[in-house]
Image (spheres, rainbow, N blue to C red):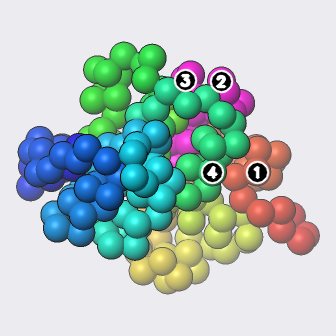
Amino acid sequence: MLAQPATQARVPNKVVGEAQDGLEAIEAVKQYKPDLILLDVSMPKARGTEVVVEVQRWSPATKIVIFTGVTSPALLTALIDFGVHGLFHKSTDFSQMLMQLPLIVQGAHYIDERIQQELGVDQAESNLTVRERQVLNLLISGQSNREIGSALGISPKTVDKHRSNVMTKLDVHSFAELMRFALKQGLVDDLDGV
C-alpha cells in the first residue's frame, strides 16, 4: 500500500497504489513518491529488504512500514538498521498499526510489542524521532542549546522542547540521568570524557 496524507492533518488517507510483488512496489514508489509505504518482507520478485533500499533511493522522504510474520532477529535488526520507520508483526491487531501510522508519517519510529520481545527493544527508545536523536547526541557531547540550535538550524527554544520530549519519552528527570540512560542503552555513541 502506498499512501498520501491529508494536507493539513498529515494522516495517511488516500491509497495511491498497490503492488503484487517487490518489483511492482519499486515502480509504484518511483511513480507516486508516496508519503508512506506498507510492505511485507516476503514478496515475490524482490524481497522486502531490497524494496526498502530502492524506496530510500527513489523516494527518500517516504516513510517505510513493515508488516510481517517473520521473527528472525537478524532480519528484523537488519530492517531497523536499513532505517524502516515502523515494524509490525502480522499477529498485531491491525487497528493498533492504524493508530501509529499518523505518528510515523510525522517522523516517529515504532516497533510493535511482539517484535520488541523478539529483539529485546524498549519502545520508548524506538519512539524517538530523528530530530530528537540528533538533539540527544549533541546534548550528550556537551553542546549548549544555542550551539545545537545553530548546528541544526533551529532555535534554542525548539532545542529545549526536543530535550524535554526526549526526557519525557525515556522517563528520566535530570540531565545526568539522561546521560547515563542514553549511554547504557546505546542510544548514542560512547563519547570520550562523558
Mark 2 or 1: in front is: 2
Q: Residue at x 40, y 66 (%)?
A: 54
Amino acid on which the number 3 mark rests in the picture: Glu
Up/down of 75 relative to 162, above or below: above
Residue 84 at what x, y percent from top left?
A: 47, 51
Indicate whether residue 120 is drawn in magenta.
Answer: yes
Q: Earlier in the sequence, mark 3 or mark 1?
A: 3
> Circle 4 is placed at which residue position?
78
Residue underneath mark 2: 117
Report how far apart the C-alphas of labels 2 and 4 lie in the structure.
16 Å
> Is disc 2 surrounded by few (<14), some (14 to 19) or many (20+) residues within 10 Å?
few
Rounded to the nearest angstrom, the CA distance separating label 4 from label 1 is 17 Å
Image height check: is 95 above or below 131?
Answer: above
Q: Residue 113 shows which numbered tag?
A: 3
Residue 108 spot, x, y in % from top left:
42, 47
Which residue in the protein does label 1 denote?
186
Q: Nearer the viewer, mark 3 or mark 4?
A: 4
Instruction: Using the rendered image of the protein, determine whether residue 94 is visible from the camera's viewpoint.
Output: yes
Q: Which residues are magenta?
A: 113-128
**Amino acid type for the residue under numbered disc 2:** Gln
Considering the image in quadrants, where does the C terminus appear? bottom right
Q: Which is nearer the N-term, disc 2 or disc 4?
A: 4
Q: Secondary structure at mark 4?
A: helix
The type of residue carrying mark 4 is Ala
Q: Kindly identify the residue that appears in the image at 50 percent across and 27 percent down.
A: 69
Q: Relative to residue 1, is residue 130 drawn left or right?
A: right
